[in-house]
């Protein structure tokens, strides 16, 4: 089963839950860190990295000698990445989405492509876990391709946990798409609830079944639980604020290292989700 | 007019809480929520309801089944895994709006139209003016919406002669963050003293170095890990960041939020006082 862990709001405990869940499930499980803008799972799982490869996207190269300034490239580029000035094409590489449209459109075949380094993909093991993450190069605009590439590393068998980026737009959607189930993590504050509503709406739109874990539930109010009851969003776990977990987290320790009793709970939750009993 | 942008790299470190308090301390000012993906600042600023303007962020392709000859050219040219076959159709959430399928369909069976992907508004709030936007869930082009919102907020600030534009940013370092950086005078990086907080702060710091923007560090929940707080401050100083101080862990912050108020608005607290000191340091720095 592929289980993604997402939230809408950032900093609610996605990475904590994902790393603890992966550890609790033990042998044969894969953890993919798809928060490629800020991947943090490795800080907690401390994997032995077995391979690190560059991740590239294609960007156009214009052969000025062949260009006859038809302007087709400028016309088809939806991202304003190619502009003609005084009959000469200029490329704004950081605007390019690597769609390849300009290459196909050029009647003179004056455009080819070259790789542009956009990030790194790491693979390794943490104990008996398979681990992979992506690290987007700083200054790159879009994490989406890299997220898709990391997701493709999921082993063909065994359970997979995917740690997702925050938000509800393209990065989050691309990380969650294809999951059998999405476990949302939120905190019961007005900010948490507002973003939870967006995340649930998004998951309904992309048709991924989901349920909720409320983190630090004693630090907020009851509005989130009331909303979930009204909307039929199942709450699978409530974790109270625990200073020891927070301090352990600050030092790069998973919550299981200070609260091993959560291993059993997390395993049970995973089993219930797998059995289809969590919706 | 000075633009102050609150960022963090890592999510949930307290950007919106700090932005809300800064809006109150800088009042009357313009405040803009550049986290259009998961906008929350309006919850504590309670702007007056006004009519929203539509945002058309980009185009999406759709296949007309009556004209489709199932030649498969769209599937071949799409680089975003957005085309499914038998029958050929385009996934709305995977489509990146490049139009390559539409340009290359030999049967002319693919339409390529602008889609409504969000809304934005500028309205009065108790600390001046608030610019907010909302991206429809599962929509794209948050960067474009952030850029639009910023342009409008800057116009409003200049027209009304406001001294400060306070911008609440998105987590991460990708497209919405890049779109919020243009013309900014200072970035306040709110970071937690944790190993992941430091890792994510360093990535944000590198982005600011590339973009040549002055950064200031504000450590939140500093007392959760004193050694890590010291490390963060040392690293930040080495990278040319100014230090705005430390906010202690304080459950009063949540209480203020539950009351839909900005930090410090309902009286003094340890965290509120720390944020006020941070604002005073920043203001002095910006006036230099």
Image (cartoon, coloured by chain):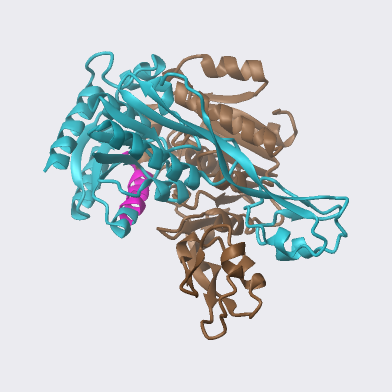
Chain colours: A brown, B cyan
Determine whether B227 is above or below B30 in the image: below
Count how many numbered circles sit on residues in the image: 0
Q: Residue furthest front?
A: A86
Residue A7 can be seen, yes or no: no
Q: Which residues make up the magenta segment?
A: B190-206
Q: Measured from the top left, where is residue A110 in percent x and y?
A: 59, 80
Q: Residue at x 66, y 77 (%)?
A: A107
Quadrant in the picture for residue B13:
top left
Residue at 47%, 57% (x, y): give it.
A135
- In the image, taking residue A232 as reference, residue B232 lies left or right, namely left
Residue B163 makes an appearance in the image: yes
- B138 horizontally vs B204: left or right: right
Q: Residue furthest bottom?
A: A65
Q: Is residue B230 left or right of residue B12?
A: left
Task: Assess whether residue B191 is covered by the magenta stretch.
Answer: yes
Position of B269 compared to A169: left or right? left
* Quadrant assignment for the N terminus of chain B: top left
Closer to the camera in the image, B247 or B171 = B171
Residue A252 drawn above or below residue B133: below
Residues A143 and B2: in front is B2
* Residue A117 belongs to the span the image colors magenta: no
The secondary structure that dominates the magenta segment is: helix
Q: Nearer the viewer, residue A62 or B204?
A: A62
Residue B279 versus residue B143: which sits nearer the camera? Answer: B143
Quadrant location, the C terminus of chain B: top left
Residue that appears at 61% across and 20% down: A228
Q: Position of residue A55 (x, y in %)?
A: 53, 66
Residue A203 at what x, y percent from top left? 65, 35
Query: Residue B211, image x and y in percent?
Result: 31, 57
């Amino acid at each position: 089963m592929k289980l993604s862990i997402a939230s809408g709001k950032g900093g609610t405990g996605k990475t904590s839950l994902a790393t603890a869940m992966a550890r609790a499930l033990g042998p044969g499980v894969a953890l993919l860190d798809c928060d490629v803008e800020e991947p943090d799972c490795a800080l907690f799982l401390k994997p032995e990295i077995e391979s690190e490869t560059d991740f590239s996207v294609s960007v156009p190269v214009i052969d000025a000698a062949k260009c006859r300034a038809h302007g087709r490239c400028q016309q088809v580029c939806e991202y304003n990445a190619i502009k003609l000035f005084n009959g000469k094409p200029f490329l704004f590489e950081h605007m390019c989405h690597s769609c390849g449209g300009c290459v196909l459109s050029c009647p003179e075949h004056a455009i080819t492509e070259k790789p542009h380094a956009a990030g790194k993909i790491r693979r390794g093991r943490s104990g008996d876990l398979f681990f992979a993450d992506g690290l987007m190069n700083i200054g790159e605009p879009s994490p989406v391709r890299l997220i898709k590439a990391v997701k493709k590393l999921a082993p063909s068998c065994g359970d997979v946990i995917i740690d997702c980026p925050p938000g509800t737009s393209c990065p989050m959607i691309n990380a969650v798409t294809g999951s059998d189930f999405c476990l949302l993590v939120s905190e019961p504050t007005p900010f948490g609830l507002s973003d939870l509503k967006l995340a649930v709406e998004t998951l309904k739109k992309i048709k991924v079944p989901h349920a909720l874990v409320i983190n630090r539930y004693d630090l907020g109010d009851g509005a989130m639980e009331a909303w979930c009851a009204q909307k039929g969003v199942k709450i699978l776990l409530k974790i109270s604020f625990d200073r020891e977990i927070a301090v352990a987290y600050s030092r790069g320790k998973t919550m299981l290292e200070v609260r091993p009793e959560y291993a059993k709970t997390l395993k049970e939750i995973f089993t219930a989700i797998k059995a289809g009993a969590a919706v | 007019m000075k633009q102050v942008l609150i960022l963090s790299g890592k999510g949930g470190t307290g950007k919106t809480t700090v932005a809300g308090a800064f809006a109150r301390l800088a009042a009357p000012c313009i405040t803009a929520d550049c986290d259009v993906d998961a906008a929350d600042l309006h919850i504590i600023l309670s702007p007056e309801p006004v009519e929203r303007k539509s945002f058309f962020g980009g185009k999406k392709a759709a296949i007309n089944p009556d004209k489709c000859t199932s030649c498969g050219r769209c599937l071949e040219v799409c680089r975003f895994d957005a085309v499914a076959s038998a029958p050929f159709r385009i996934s709305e959430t995977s489509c990146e709006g490049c139009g390559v399928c539409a340009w290359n369909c030999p049967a002319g069976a693919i339409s390529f139209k602008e889609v409504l992907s969000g809304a934005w508004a500028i309205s009065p709030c108790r600390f001046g003016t608030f610019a907010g936007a909302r991206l429809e869930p599962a929509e794209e082009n948050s960067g474009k919406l952030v850029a639009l919102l910023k342009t409008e907020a800057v116009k409003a600030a200049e027209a009304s002669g406001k001294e400060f534009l306070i911008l609440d940013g998105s987590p991460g370092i990708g497209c919405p963050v890049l779109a919020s950086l243009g013309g900014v005078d200072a970035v306040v990086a709110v970071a937690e003293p944790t190993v992941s907080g430091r890792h994510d702060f360093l990535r944000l710091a590198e982005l600011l170095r590339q973009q040549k923007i002055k950064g200031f560090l504000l450590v939140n929940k500093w007392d959760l890990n004193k050694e890590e707080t010291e490390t963060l401050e040392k690293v930040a100083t080495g990278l040319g960041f100014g230090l705005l101080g430390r906010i202690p862990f304080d459950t009063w912050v949540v209480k203020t939020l539950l009351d839909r108020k900005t930090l410090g608005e309902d009286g003094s607290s340890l965290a509120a006082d720390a944020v006020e000191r941070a604002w005073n340091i920043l203001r002095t720095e910006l006036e230099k």
